[in-house]
């Protein structure tokens, strides 16, 4: 019979004590689904009804930006937007669709500092972004401006990068990229407005050039909306000599795609 503390630790009394404390805390503060708030067996899990509400992303999708296609389209197919203008990053992937059913997952982390879902987020992002992680040298979290970081006290993209790193084994370069301009919130901006807002907002720290030059890097962020932030980050990394830049986000906004046959 599997012991109740087996999932918490491998060794002796310390593991048993930790399991006992964890079980006691679960009685006082039972783990809740980060989406619905209903009780679940472990922190960060979704209950069955939650699973049915989340649109997890998988092929077929655009080879470049990862937007899902409505039907199988053949290997290497790109969406009309990427065919007209290839992104600076070579490919981007996301774990699930950002919509009214799922946005509480991303916003709970970003604005409420809710971290109990990070373990699951890391697994979902690593699975969706397996192509991006293949052969990658480092994960680069999209940075916050120092003023925003002081206000929020944490960078959700760094938390996600560490979660993906634990699953994938790819290391995190937390300080290679910096945000040099405090940009206004992009909520409500048009796609062109977001591009203008992000122009020149990022650069590679001179002391970290060797961590970027010639390397295959993966940007990590919470939500892919228009791609303006990812593009600005990728452009800064490429200018500093990165060999390749890819991107994985927790969620992405999805609009219908009309494929050109």
Image (cartoon, rainbow, N blue to C red):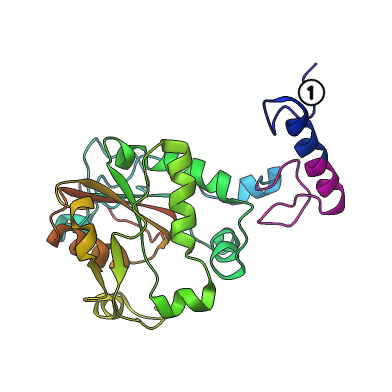
Q: Give the answer, above or below, for where 241 lies relative to 43.
A: below
Residue placed most toward the observer, 211 or 60: 211
User: Percent from the top left, x then y, of residue 53?
Assistant: 61, 51
To which quarter of the image does residue 142 belong?
Answer: bottom left
Residue placed most toward the observer, 219 or 65: 219
According to the picture, the residue beneath numbered tag 1 turns out to be 3
Q: Is residue 227 visible?
A: no
Residue 17 falls left or right of residue 50: right
User: Percent from the top left, x then y, of residue 115?
Assistant: 61, 56
Per the rendered image, the range of residues in magenta is 21-44
Q: Give the answer, above or below, for where 120 lies relative to 100.
A: above
Q: Name the residue at 78% across, 29% down.
A: 13
Q: Name the residue at 37% across, 80% down.
A: 189
**Badge 1 element:** loop
Q: Name the residue at 43% across, 43% down.
A: 165
Q: Give the answer, above or below, for where 250 lies relative to 125.
A: below
User: Percent from the top left, x then y, of residue 92?
Assistant: 31, 51
Q: Is residue 166 visible?
A: yes
């Amino acid at each position: 019979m599997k012991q109740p503390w087996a999932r918490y630790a491998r060794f002796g009394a310390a593991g048993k004590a930790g399991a006992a404390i964890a079980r006691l805390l679960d009685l006082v503060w039972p783990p809740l689904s980060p989406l619905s708030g209903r009780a679940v067996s472990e922190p960060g899990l979704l209950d069955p009804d939650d699973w049915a509400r989340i649109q997890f992303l998988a092929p077929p999708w655009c080879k470049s930006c990862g937007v899902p296609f409505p039907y199988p389209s053949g290997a290497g197919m790109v969406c009309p937007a990427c065919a007209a203008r290839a992104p600076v990053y070579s490919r981007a992937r996301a774990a699930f669709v950002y919509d009214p059913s799922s946005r509480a997952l991303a916003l709970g982390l970003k604005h409420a500092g809710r971290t109990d879902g990070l373990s699951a987020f890391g697994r979902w992002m690593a699975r969706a972004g397996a192509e991006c992680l293949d052969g990658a040298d480092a994960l680069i979290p999209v940075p916050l401006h120092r003023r925003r970081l002081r206000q929020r006290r944490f960078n959700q993209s760094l938390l996600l990068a560490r979660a993906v790193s634990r699953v994938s084994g790819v290391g995190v370069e937390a300080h290679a990229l910096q945000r040099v301009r405090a940009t206004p919130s992009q909520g409500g901006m048009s796609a062109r407005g977001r591009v203008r807002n992000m122009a020149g907002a990022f650069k590679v720290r001179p002391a970290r050039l060797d961590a970027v030059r010639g390397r295959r890097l993966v940007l990590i962020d919470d939500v892919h909306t228009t791609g303006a932030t990812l593009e600005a980050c990728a452009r800064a990394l490429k200018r500093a000599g990165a060999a390749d830049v890819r991107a994985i986000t927790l969620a992405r906004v999805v609009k219908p795609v009309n494929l050109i046959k």
